[in-house]
Image (cartoon, rainbow, N blue to C red):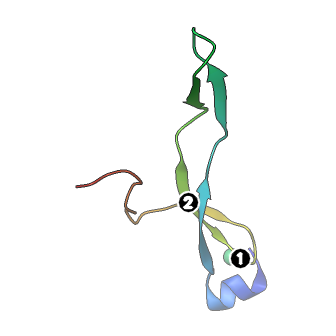
Amino acid sequence: MNFFCRVLGHTWVPIADNPKTNWNVDKTGQLLTATPAGAVRFYDECARCKERREATVTRPRAGSSA
Ligand SMILES: [Zn+2]
């Protein structure tokens, strides 16, 4: 652990791990379809020592109207 982290505590910065989206044409060859490579993960990373922790806060999801 970083010295400053030990004294001051970690400085958590929220990070979103956004996987690539694969674009493919459909069977007709005229329409692009998006295939997400994986689910988006949210976690926190310390700005000093780069230690990571899973985000515990619930953030609003994109596209949810509720
Ligand atoms: Zn730290």
Say what amino acid the circle numbered 2 marks: Tyr
Q: Which residue is mark 2?
A: 43
Q: Position of residue 27 (x, y in %)?
A: 57, 8
Image-quadrant location for residue 35: top right
The amino acid beneath tag 1 is: Ala
Residue sitting farthest toward the bottom: 8
- Dot 1 beta carbon under 8 Å from ligand 1: yes
Circle 2 sits in a helix, a strand or a loop, which is it?
A: strand
In the rendered view, tell whether residue 41 sits above or below residue 30: below
Label 2: how many Cα within 10 Å (few below 14, some 14–19, many 20+): some
Instruction: Check residue 47 in the rendering and tell me which mark sits there, or answer none.
Output: 1
Indicate the quadrant containing the N terminus: top left, top right, bottom left or bottom right.
bottom right
How far, Cα to Cα, is label 1 from label 2? 13 Å
Query: Residue at the spot x=63%, y=13% of the render?
Result: 29
Where is residue 7? Give x, y as percent.
Answer: 67, 91
Toward which corner of the image does residue 44 lie, by quadrant? bottom right
Side of 57 where 65 appears, left or right: left
Q: Residue at x 61, y 32 (%)?
A: 37
